[in-house]
Amino acid sequence: MTKREALLKEVDGVPEAYLGEVLDFVLFLKKRIARDAYACAAVSESVLAKDWLRPEEDEAWKDL
């Protein structure tokens, strides 16, 4: 059984009154995943800019 299947099985056993909390937690996790991906991209940008801003890069991309 995959983790997804196990999670769905467990959610099926949660009383209706608590499903709102389960949904809130899942949405929180999805926001955190998106935030972490953005943070990683933002940090990478300054490191990659060292390569992007070289004259050799400008020359390589000038015809596009």
Image (cartoon, helix red, strand yellow):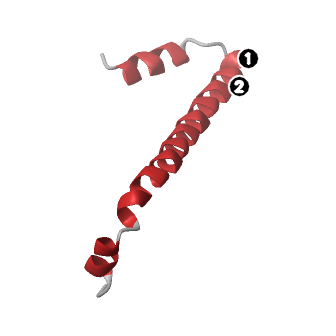
Is 17 left or right of 43, judged from the image as shown?
A: right
Decide: is 15 above or below 25. above
Q: Quadrant of the N terminus?
A: top left
Count every numbered label the image shows and give the total: 2
Number of other residues with Cα within 10 Å of mark 2, as a class: few under 14, some 14 to 19, many 20 or more: few
Residue pointed to by mark 2: 20
Residue pointed to by mark 1: 17
* Between 26 and 10, the one nearer to me in the picture: 26
Which tag is nearer the camera, tag 2 or tag 1?
A: 2
Is 31 left or right of 3, judged from the image as shown?
A: right
Task: Tell me which amino acid carries mark 1.
Answer: Ala
Whether tag 2 and tag 1 are in contact, CB under 8 A, the answer is yes
* Between 11 and 37, the one nearer to me in the picture: 37
Which numbered disc covers residue 49?
Answer: none
Q: Residue furthest right?
A: 17
Q: Residue at x 62, y 34 (%)?
A: 27
Is 27 left or right of 46, judged from the image as shown?
A: right
Q: Quadrant of the C terminus?
A: bottom left
* Between 59 and 31, the one nearer to me in the picture: 59
